Image (spheres, helix red, strand yellow):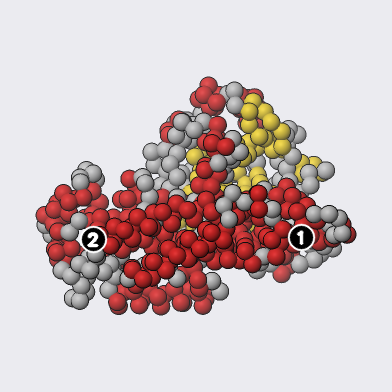
């Protein structure tokens, strides 16, 4: 164990990317985020998507500082995990549990002493606030991050008393920080600053090899002077990419899958964080589990002759990573079953109400331009092409997601940003009062001065826009809402296939499998075949 005090220092500018490489997004459509950031594993910042959160209203004073009195009054009896930022223990910061009111008292005294270097720097981390206060409603998950298989799975286990979640609250004084790491299961993460300011150092996958010491251990603090000592970190000079991001209050950062990062609180800061994954990065999660199991097998290879050695490897892997192959199989089943059921319902609806009269969302010309753009991105950044096989918008239960879904149907065919903005502006003007769908359409038609601009967004080969407006808007959206379901099932099929082919999976005892993954795989394949035979495959 060693004592550490972090002094903020600048990275070598020759190896640090400018902040413009991580764009700040405001009011973009879900499918834009899906295609240009989540599917290609690219970081970004969001602004304007935390407005109205209860946590921002009640946890923050009028001066933008934490409201210590409110937090102590409402959550003072909670037991919270707290890390000591000035100490290192086995590559991380040692933790202890404290009462929330005691942590807040420490925090105020630390500020009063001008963040003294002689005192401990404590950081409240990984507090399962939502699990502990489920009815409080501190925030709403932004629509961009709602395709969250990880928390969907753990929420499904709550009734069995074995549930967990990956939703956290962080609170810490200026100079508190988190060492270099990649997130659990190599998941995505999003982090919203309720108040304060953070500095992020982000390293794309592959760059971490240059951040390891001569014994293979990952660096604890990449800003430490010892990083430049070639006898300790012999490959640090080969580092090519580091993205430095300053995150302000109210902004939300998207951290891609498998990106290592180190984070500093530049001010007294409160943040809300989720870990999550879905069809876009499930292959990265699977590769991570395979790598972890291989490392375990190597570490106890001298015990290979012991009885049930393969089972013991699974036990150790679960202790190290939080999951083993049996639970991963259960996870895939839990995610697949409701999607099979929902897609089956949609197919039944399609059979009862054919969509031959429903206009196509895209013109061929516009779709070709999108495909060309995807190819360019893939070729330029070595991105997995299968991520682009199916892209689109998922139906969400909350009204914000449905609203975003409506915006997508209106602007999908807009190649001109000005026209796209006009169409989106008209749509928002007419949906603000939450009229029923048909009334929205009628009011949309009646909005003078915009109709010609909207007509220009559709090619001559498509059905006239006025005719489209007269149709039930929900039916117009059906060609979009299937995209995420089909994409999800195709990704699930690929991973279940790989799991069943894994030699080590054959050693998992059948009694540990709640549902046979072979049966789930057959159901997924059957449903995908039905989609292809229905004629919907051309639309999705």
On screen, residue 210 above or below 84 = below
Horizontal side of residue 29 vs 103, given as left or right: left
Q: Position of residue 27 (x, y in %)?
A: 36, 54
* Disc number lying in front (2 or 1): 2
Q: Position of residue 418 (x, y in %)?
A: 27, 65
Q: Secondary structure at mark 1?
A: helix
Q: Quadrant of residue 107?
A: top right
Asked whether the residues under the numbered discs 2 and 1 touch, taking CB atoms below 8 Å apart as contact, a structural biologist would say no
Q: Residue at the location (85% across, 59% down)?
A: 304
On screen, residue 311 above or below 369 = above
- Does the image show residue 69? no
Q: Position of residue 103 (x, y in %)?
A: 64, 28
Q: Residue at the location (60% across, 44% down)?
A: 265
Q: Residue at the location (61% across, 38% down)?
A: 162
In the rendered view of the protein, which quadrant contains the N terminus?
top right
Residue that label 1 marks: 295
Q: Secondary structure at mark 2?
A: loop
Q: Earlier in the sequence, mark 2 or mark 1?
A: 1
Of the numbered discs in the image, which one, if any, rests on residue 256? none
Residue that label 2 marks: 353
Q: Position of residue 436 (x, y in %)?
A: 20, 46
- Does the image show residue 74? yes
């Amino acid at each position: 164990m060693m004592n550490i005090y972090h002094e903020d220092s600048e990275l070598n500018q020759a190896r640090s990317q400018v902040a413009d490489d991580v764009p700040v997004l405001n009011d973009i459509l879900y499918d834009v985020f899906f295609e240009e950031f989540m599917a290609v594993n690219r970081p970004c910042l969001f602004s304007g998507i935390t407005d109205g959160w209860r946590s921002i209203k009640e946890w923050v004073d009028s001066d933008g500082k934490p409201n210590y009195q409110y937090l102590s009054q409402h959550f003072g009896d909670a037991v919270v995990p707290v890390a000591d930022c000035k100490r290192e223990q086995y590559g991380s910061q040692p933790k202890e549990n404290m009462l929330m009111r005691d942590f807040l008292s420490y925090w105020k005294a630390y500020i009063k002493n001008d963040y003294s270097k002689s005192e401990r720097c404590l950081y409240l981390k990984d507090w399962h606030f939502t699990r502990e206060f489920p009815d409080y409603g501190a925030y709403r998950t932004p629509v961009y991050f709602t395709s969250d298989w990880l928390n969907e799975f753990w929420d499904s286990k709550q009734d069995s008393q074995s549930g967990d979640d990956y939703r956290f609250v962080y609170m810490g004084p200026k100079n508190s920080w988190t060492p270099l790491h990649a997130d659990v299961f190599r998941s995505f993460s999003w982090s919203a600053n309720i108040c304060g300011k953070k500095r992020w150092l982000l390293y794309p996958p592959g760059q971490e090899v240059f951040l390891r010491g001569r014994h293979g251990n990952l660096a604890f603090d990449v800003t430490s002077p010892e990083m430049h000592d070639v006898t300790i970190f012999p490959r640090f000079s080969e580092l090519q990419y580091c993205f430095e991001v300053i995150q302000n209050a109210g902004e939300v950062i998207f951290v891609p899958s498998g990106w290592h990062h180190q984070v500093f609180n530049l001010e007294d800061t409160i943040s809300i964080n989720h870990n999550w994954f879905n069809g876009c990065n499930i292959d990265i999660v699977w590769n991570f589990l395979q790598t972890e199991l291989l490392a375990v097998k190597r570490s106890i290879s001298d015990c290979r002759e012991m009885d049930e050695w393969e089972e013991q490897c699974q036990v150790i892997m679960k202790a190290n990573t939080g999951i083993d192959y049996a639970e991963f199989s259960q996870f895939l089943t839990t995610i697949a079953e409701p999607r099979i059921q929902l897609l089956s319902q949609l197919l039944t609806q399609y059979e009862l109400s054919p969509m031959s009269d429903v206009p196509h969302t895209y013109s061929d010309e516009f779709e070709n331009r999108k495909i060309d753009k995807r190819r360019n991105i893939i070729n330029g950044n070595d991105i997995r092409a299968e991520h682009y096989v199916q892209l689109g918008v998922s139906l969400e239960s909350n009204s914000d997601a449905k609203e975003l879904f409506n915006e997508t149907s209106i602007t999908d065919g807009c190649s001109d940003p000005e026209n796209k903005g006009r169409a989106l502006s008209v749509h928002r003007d007419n949906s603000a009062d939450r009229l029923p769908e048909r009334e929205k359409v009628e009011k949309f038609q009646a909005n003078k001065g915009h109709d010609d601009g909207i007509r220009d967004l559709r090619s001559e080969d498509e059905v006239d826009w006025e005719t489209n407006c007269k149709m039930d808007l929900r039916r117009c959206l059906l060609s979009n809402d299937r995209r995420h379901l089909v994409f999800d099932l195709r990704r699930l099929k690929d991973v279940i296939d790989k799991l069943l082919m894994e030699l080590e999976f054959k050693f998992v005892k059948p009694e540990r499998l709640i549902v046979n993954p072979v049966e789930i795989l057959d159901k997924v394949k059957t449903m995908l075949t039905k989609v292809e035979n229905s004629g919907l495959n051309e639309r999705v």
